[in-house]
Image (spheres, rainbow, N blue to C red):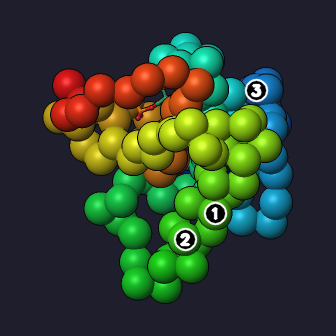
Amino acid sequence: MSKDCLFCRIVAKEIPAKIVHEDEQAIAFDDINPQAPTHILVVPRRHIPSLNELAAKDAGLIGHLHLVAAQLARQRGIAESGYRVVLNTGRGAGQSVFHLHLHLLGGRGMRWPPG
Ligand code: AMP
Ligand code: ZN
């Protein structure tokens, strides 16, 4: 746990969030500034700053985060209409919180390429 990390503090329940999933490895909560009707963040409990710091031993964990995203997409009824899973890495790509997280976005049409 990093004291200065917003998502570590949400994982520790020091900062409130609308939590929609919790398990041993991950939690998921609504994004505070949603960019789509469904906008959920899927976050490992362990502090990993970004994909750049992911180790080979974390292969199962990163897979698990995707399985949680797919399960939540089914629960929200967007699995068939389509959804996007985004993992911003580095400031140039729009990463603003340096605790690894997947964005699950859906419930509206999506354009490609992203901006
Ligand atoms: P990124 O820009 O990829 O690092 O994503 C960070 C996301 O965290 C943004 O979509 C923010 O809206 C979201 N966010 C920031 N603070 C909070 C918070 N306290 N609770 C929930 N989501 C947050
Ligand atoms: Zn953290």
Residue holding disc 3: 17
In this view of the protein, can residue 41 be seen by the observer? no
Of mark 3 and mark 2, the one earlier in the sequence is 3
Say if mark 3 contacts mark 2, CB within 8 Å. Answer: no
Q: Residue at x 52, y 67 (%)?
A: 62
Question: What is the crowding at mark 3: few (fewer than 14 residues within 10 Å), some, or many (at least 20)?
Answer: some
Question: Does the Cβ of the disc 2 residue fall within 8 Å of ligand 1?
Answer: no
Q: Gap between marks 2 and 1, in whole Å?
A: 6 Å
Give amino acid for label 1.
Leu
Task: Please give left or right for residue 59 compared with residue 73 in the image.
Answer: left
Q: Of helix, strand and loop, which one carries label 2?
A: helix
Question: Does the Cβ of the disc 1 residue fall within 8 Å of ligand 1?
Answer: no
Q: Gap between marks 3 and 2, in whole Å?
A: 24 Å
Give amino acid for label 2.
Gly
Percent x, y of residue 40: 62, 34
In the image, residue 63 above or below residue 5: below
Question: What is the crowding at mark 2: few (fewer than 14 residues within 10 Å), some, or many (at least 20)?
Answer: few
Q: Of helix, strand and loop, which one carries label 1?
A: helix
Residue holding disc 1: 67
Task: Please give left or right for residue 102 compared with residue 39 in the image.
Answer: left
Mark closer to the observer (3, 2): 2
Question: Does the Cβ of the disc 3 residue fall within 8 Å of ligand 1?
Answer: yes
> Which residue lies most toward the bottom here?
57
Q: Gap between marks 1 and 3, in whole Å?
A: 21 Å
Percent x, y of residue 103: 50, 39
Q: Residue at x 20, y 34 (%)?
A: 113
> Which residue lies most toward the top here?
33
Residue holding disc 2: 63
Say if mark 2 contacts mark 1, CB within 8 Å. Answer: yes
Of mark 1 and mark 3, the one earlier in the sequence is 3
Decide which of 39, 16 is in the foreground and name it.
39
